[in-house]
Amino acid sequence: MKDPRDIILRPLVTEKTTGLMEKNKYAFVVDKRANKIEIRKAVEELFGVKVEAVNTINVRGKPKRVGIHRGYTPSRKKAIVTLKEGSKPIELFE
């Protein structure tokens, strides 16, 4: 099995995800090859919480231009993790 730190790359903190925290949902940038089961196990192991659901989103890179050079921002995968009712909040986001 993969190391949980290789699956969960970093937390995702934006205005939208801050609003989701009130509903007991947290967002992470995860490895593109990770599936929902691996993400669930990694979050439970790293933060010591019980996960109810995992939703994933594949985000394609956007085209960018610097002068005459064109390229794309990196593609990434996001995961929205819903914790079970009565579960403690993740301290990383507090």
Image (tube, rainbow, N blue to C red):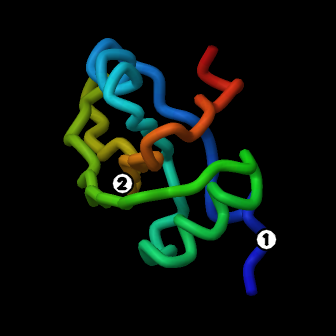
Which residue type carries mark 1?
A: Asp
Residue carrying label 1: 3
Is the C-beta separation of discs 2 and 1 under 8 Å? Answer: no
Front-lying residue, 84 or 11:
84
Q: Nearer the viewer, residue 72 or 7?
A: 7
Location of residue 43 by image quarter: bottom right
Q: Determine the residue positioned at 27% across, 59% down.
A: 58
Q: Secondary structure at mark 1?
A: loop
Residue pictured at 56% horizontal, 40% vertical: 87
Q: Is residue 45 above or below residue 87?
A: below
Residue that carries the numbered disc 2 in the rendered image: 75
In screen coordinates, is 65 left or right of 7? left
Camera-nearest residue between 58 and 35: 35
Q: Earlier in the sequence, mark 2 or mark 1?
A: 1
The residue sitting at 30% across, 36% down in the picture is 69
Residue 30: image x %, image y %? 52, 56
What is the secondary structure assignment of the residue under circle 2? Answer: loop
> Is label 2 or label 1 in front?
1
Q: Could you classify mark 1 by the number of other residues whose Cα lies within 10 Å: few (under 14), some (14-19), or many (20 or more)?
A: few
Distance between the alpha carbons at the discs numbered 2 and 1: 22 Å
Give the quadrant of the C terminus.
top right
Q: Could you tell me residue 20's position as x and y percent?
A: 31, 26
